[in-house]
Amino acid sequence: MRIAIFSDTFPPEINGVANFVYSSAKTLSERGHQVKVFTASRISQKRLNEKIGKNFQIFTVPSIHSPIYPNTRIPLPTGLTLPYLLKFKPDIIHAHTPFTLGWGAIMGAKILGVPLVGTHHTFFDHYLKHAKIDFAVARRATWRYTVSFYNYCDLVTVPSHSLAQEMKSHGLKKPITVLPNLVDVALFKLAAAAEKSRLKKHFKIKKKSLVYMGRLSYEKSIGQVIRAFKIASRKIPDLQLMIIGDGPERENLKKLAKKLGVAKKTTFTGFLRGRKLINALQANDIFVTASKTETFCIAALEAMAVGLPVVAVGEKGPTEFIKDKINGFLVKDDRPKMMADKITKLITNKQIRKQFGEKSRTLAEKYSKEKNIAKLEKIYESQAKIN
C-alpha cells in the first residue's frame, strides 16, 4: 500500500505527535508499505532523509519559527505538496494535524479521490494559554475549528475514549475509532538489578528517585509534582526527583524548586533521546505526573514499559491504561498532599513497588508498536475498500 502521511511536526521536534508519526511511518515501511511523509522541519529535507535511511521518504515544505512555542515550526501554505502527491499516487492519505499540512492532505485527497484518515492527538483548548487567549469564546472557537477540519475526513482516530467522546460532543459527524499511542517495548524494557544499580550511579541517584518526562509547560502541572516531592521529602529525606524534558516553564520550575528548598535534590536533564532516555527512566523508581490534560500520555507508557509504577492524576486518557492499585495510584488533580502520600507508600514498600512495576510492564505490552500498527493497517484497508 502507498501511504501519504501529513504532519506539521516531525522529529527532531519532541512531542507525542512527532514521535507517533515517525514511529508509525518507520514501522509501516518495515512491514512492506511505501510511505511518504509531508512535514515541516528546521532540518533540511536532504539531512532528514539521510537520517532515516531507506525506511521511508520525507518531503518538507517551507516553514517559519513559531513565536508562541519554542522549537516548533509553522508550515507556509504553499501548495507544494500536490505535485508530489500526484506523482506518488497514494492509496490512502493520513493527516495528523489540522493545520497547514492537514489542509494540504484534504485538498490532495479530494483531487486524487483517495480516502483520508485523520488523527486528532490532543485537547487543543488546553494550550490556549500559550497564545494568551485562554477564554471561553476561544475554547469554543478552537473546538469548532478542530471538529470542522476532521469532518472532512472519511474516518477519524484518537488515542483515547475520553477524546473520542469530546469530539462527538462537539459535533464530529464522521466515524471515529480509538487507536492508542504505541511504545517500542523491545527498546523500553526492564533493567536487571545490577544494571539499575549502575544506572543510578551514572545519574548520581543515591537511593530512590521519582521521574517526570514530557514538555515543561503550564498545562502539564509539573509544579504540583515538585510540591508533592517536597512533601514526600519530609518523610524520605534522601528522595530525589528527575525532570526529563524542556519547554517554556523550565526556568519557572527551577525557581519553584529553589523556593521550596528542593533544588539540590532535583535534576533537570533537558531533552533526552534514544538510549540516554531509556537509561534515565530505568535509573528511577516511580513515574509521576500531575497533568490534567493528557489524551493518553506516551511518557507514562514508556515509563511503564521499563517497569516503573505510576502516580498520576485520574483524569482523561491515562485512566485507560494506568490502573489504580494495580500498576500505580490515581489521585485527584491539584492535590500534592495526596500525591505525596501515594509516592511515600510506594517508596517505602518494596513489595508493592515491585508488584506494580511488573504489572506496568505487562500493561505496556498491550500497546506495542507491532500491535497498534497492525490495527492501523486494518483501518487503512477498510477505508481503501470502502472507496
Image (cartoon, rainbow, N blue to C red):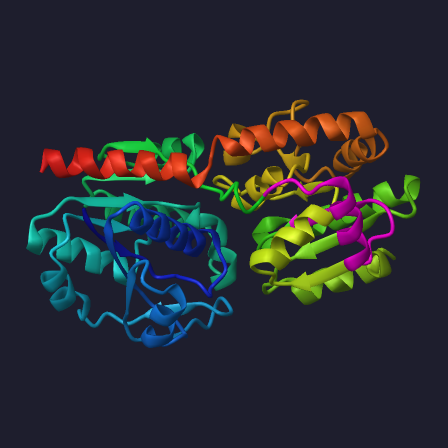
| x and y, in percent, of residue 193 in the image | 77, 40
From which residue to which does the magenta span run? Answer: 189-212
Residue found at x 27% / y 71%? 61
- Quadrant including the C terminus: top left
| x and y, in percent, of residue 190 in the image | 65, 40
Does residue 215 appear to the left or right of 385 in the view shown? right
Front residue of 47/115: it is 47
State yes or no: residue 332 in magenta: no
Furthest-top residue in this view = 325
Residue found at x 27% / y 54%? 5
Question: In the rendered image, is residue 242 in sight?
Answer: yes
Res 112 quadrant in image: bottom left
Does residue 213 appear to the left or right of 345 in the view shown? left
Residue found at x 25% / y 55%? 35
Does residue 54 appear to the left or right of 112 in the view shown? right
Front residue of 231/144: it is 231
Res 115 quadrant in image: top left
| x and y, in percent, of residue 74 in the image | 36, 69
Res 64 quadrant in image: bottom left
Front residue of 82/226: it is 82
| Whether residue 104 is situated above or below residue 50 in the rendered picture | above
Does residue 184 appear to the left or right of 205 in the view shown? left
| x and y, in percent, of residue 361 in the image | 60, 33
Residue found at x 56% / y 34%? 315
| Whether residue 233 is situated above or below residue 39 in the rendered picture | above
Question: In the rendered image, is residue 147 in sight?
Answer: no
